[in-house]
Amino acid sequence: MSLLVACGSGDGNSASAGDTVTGGSGGATSGTSDGASGGLGGGSDGGGAGEGGSGGDTDPGATSGASAGGAGGAGEGGAGDCESGPEALEGSVYQGDLLIASDADVLAARAYSTISGTISVSPGFAGTLDLPSLLEVGGIQAEGGAEPATARIKAIRMPNLVRVRGTLWIYLAFELLEADFRKLETVDERFWIHRNTELATLRLDALRTVGEDVQITGNLKLPACTLERIEANLKAAGNTDISISGGLQETGCECTLVCGQGLCL
C-alpha cells in the first residue's frame, strides 16, 4: 500500500449507563431500559503538509460538533478525508436475543452497548440498522427467507462494534448497500457475507481474528481492492479458512489504503 491517510477523532458527550435488561422472545421493544441518550459531538483535526486544513463534518445524528484545521505533517492528508464515525455512548447491557422488525426496534436497541444474544433482522425490515453505541454482541443474522425471498434491509452500521462472540451472517440481502463494521476486531465463530448483490461498501478495517471460516463471496458490487485488503489482513493474522472472491475488477489503478480500507486509486 502506498498511502495511509490519517483519520481524525470525534469528541462528544456521553450519557450515563442504564440498568441491565433481560430480554424475552418479543425483540427490542419488549424490554424496558434506563439506557440514557445524549448528544454526540465530533471534531476533527488535520491539514496538508505545512499548512492547516479544514476538518470533516460530524456524522448524521450528532447534535453538536466542531471542526478545525490543524497543521499536518509532511505527506499527511487532512483529516477531513476520513470519517472518524460517531463516538459510542455508554449504554445498558441487554440479556437475550433481539429481533429487529421495525424502526422502533432499532431505536430501542440503540440504548445498549452490549447485547448478549443474537441480533436477528426480519427479512421484511426495509430500514437501516444503525447502532453506534454497540461494542459487543453475541451474534448478527440478516438473511432472506421464504417470504419475501430476500432481505430488504438497506444498511447496517455498527461503527464501534469490536467483538462478535458468535457468528456474523449476512445472506441474500439484495437491497443492502452498506455494511459498516470498521472497528470490528474479532468474530469468535463464523463470518459469512454472501450473495448481497447490491452491497457496494464494506468496512472491515480492523478485522483480524475469526474463530471458524470466513466467506465473503457473491457480493458483485464490492470493489475487488476492498476484498484484497480484507483477505490480506486476515491472512497476516494467521487465519487460514478463508474464501473471499468476486467483486468489481478495476483496472488502471493501485489498491491504496485509505482510512483503513483498500480503495482503487
Image (cartoon, rainbow, N blue to C red):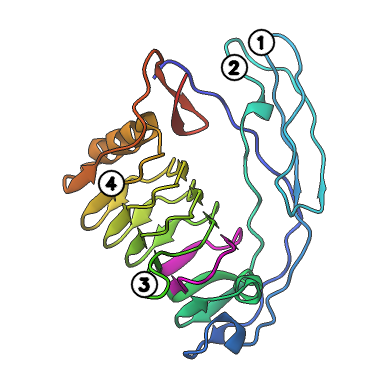
Question: Which one is earlier in the sequence, the residue at label 2 or at label 4?
Answer: 2
Seen at 41% across and 15% down, the residue is 253
Q: Which residue is mark 4?
A: 217
Q: What's drawn in magenta, residue-wise?
A: 119-139
Which of disc 3 and disc 1 is earlier in sequence?
1
Check the image and report above or below for 211 versus 21: above
The residue under label 3 is 145
Label 2 – label 4 distance at C-alpha:
34 Å
195 inside magenta stretch: no
Q: Considering the numbered disc 4 on the image, is that residue within a helix, a strand or a loop?
A: strand
| Label 3 packing within 10 angstroms: few (<14), some (14-19), many (20+) | some
Under circle 1, the secondary element is loop
* Residue type of the residue flagged with mark 2: Glu
The residue nearer to you, when weighing 248 against 226, is 248
Q: Which mark is residue 3?
A: none
**Residue behind mark 2:** 76
C-alpha distance separating marks 2 and 1: 6 Å
Q: Disc 4 or 3, which lies upstream in sequence?
A: 3
Residue 58 figure quarter: top right
Residues at discs 2 and 1 in contact (Cβ within 8 Å): yes
